[in-house]
Amino acid sequence: MRNLFRFGGAVFGAALASSLLLTSCGSGAGKPVQLSIIDVAGNLQLSKPAIEAFKAANPKLVSDIEYVSLSAPELVSKIKAQQMASNLDTTMVLTGYDGMAAGVEEQVWEQLMPKYQKDFQATIDNYLPGAKAAYDLFDGYGLTYVYCPGGPMFTYNPDKVKNPPKTAADLLAWAKANPGKFIYARPANSGPGRAFLMGLPYLLGDSNPKDPTTWDKTWAYLKELGNYIDYYPSGTGITFKELAEGTRWMIASHIGWDINQRILGTIPNTFQGLILDNTTWVTDSQFMVIPKGLDKAREHATVELMKWLMLPQEQAVTFDDGYFYPGPAIKGVTLDMAPQASQDRIRPALRPAYDQAIASLPATTQLDAKALVTAFDMWDKLIGSKAKQ
């Protein structure tokens, strides 16, 4: 078993390690079971190595693990169909806010807390504040697995942007002076676009940043900004491609995307990121949930997998290639605990200002499901429909 005691919370790590050691030796109940994991958040690029390590360490508990990738809109209907047919194949789901909220509304998730308090309370007590705030939104129906401060932030070409904007007003003035050189993707299809949209009410001082119907300053700002934007791409990847090609000089970004696109070589490592003054992070989290109706053996194995994934050393695996930077949802897990390959890729792409901003700037959760749908609808009608053709 890998070293679990490379951070300050040794008691937390020791307690979980003891529990998992018992699991590895077999619970003495029944044959190994097969698990089936649905991923609707792109999470397996962060979690699959740790999940495979769990399978290897627990041959008496788990015989095999199947992986299924779906889009978030497909998720709840698939789970409900399995439940209604009394044929529940899925044992765990990895999801973002969208699938998490939809499943709670449709009552398809098992309420993990307080049912499994003895298993998960130590993890919850050790959450980073932003991860705990995300967990608190969903009444114990899932666990926050990974956490990222998210955005809003911006990635730019320093050869073209000599005096980067410092405020939202500066950004608007820069876009006006350089028409067609700033871009962001449609918020409903883009994490960075969504963070930009949800972050502006804090930057501009709207009366209620959690209610898009009150965003008078934000909608006015985006309408004016739209005069200097050629179009709104259907995904984040397009914005980075156009930045790399030189078609754009600055784009709305996200800490994970910014780092990851340098590591992947989409943009040069010389490109820089900026965070505006008075930014409030609109955080991003992904969750682990269990569908209602599992038999005891598979539910037990899934709970043990969840506990494993929240161990400090397994959380360190989520640094990955910076896609969800930092990644870990619990306190005390630092980059030097990550696999050496992740450290070697992330360090050259990371900017010191990012960790400083993570530590110093306020953070808030994303909009709840209902408000987010309203925000998307309003953006589509007020902003997207006015795009240049």
Image (cartoon, rainbow, N blue to C red):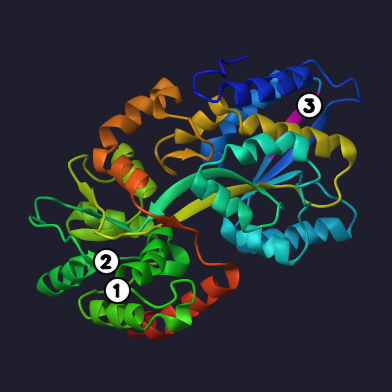
Quarter of the figure with residue 282? bottom left
x then y, percent, for residue 62: 78, 27
Q: Earlier along the polypeptide chain: callout 1 or callout 3? A: 3
Examine the rendering and report whether any part of residue 58 can be seen.
no
Are discs 2 and 1 less than 8 Å apart at CB? yes
Return the residue nearer the eye: 355 or 84: 355
Q: Residue 183 carries which label?
A: 2
* Amino acid type at image mark 3: Ser
Q: Which amino acid does label 2 sit on?
A: Ile
Residue 14 at x, y percent in the picture: 64, 20
Please tell me whether the stretch drawn in magenta is mainly helix, strand or loop: strand
Residue corresponding to mark 3: 63
Helix or strand or loop: what does disc 1 sit on? loop
- The residue pinned by badge 1 equals 231
- Which is more toward the observer, 54 or 6? 6
Tell me how far mark 1 sits from mark 3, CA to CA.
50 Å
Above or below: residue 160 compared with residue 63: below
Which residue is at a point 72% across and 44% down the rendered structure image? 92
Q: Earlier in the sequence, mark 2 or mark 1?
A: 2
Mark 1 closeness class: few <14, some 14–19, many ≥20 residues within 10 Å = some
Q: What stretch of residues is rendered in magenta?
A: 61-66
| Residue positioned 69% across, 42% down in the render | 37
CA gap, disc 3 and disc 2: 48 Å
Is residue 62 highlighted in magenta? yes
In-image side of 254 versus 96 (left or right): left
> Which quarter of the figure is the C terminus placed in?
bottom left
Single out the mark in the foreground, 3 or 2.
Answer: 2
The x, y position of residue 170, in whole percent, is 16, 68
Q: Are marks 3 and 2 in contact (CB under 8 Å)?
A: no
Q: Answer few, some or many: residues within 10 Å of disc 2's Cα (few below 14, many 20 plus, some between 14 and 19).
A: many
Q: Is mark 3 on a helix, strand or loop?
A: strand
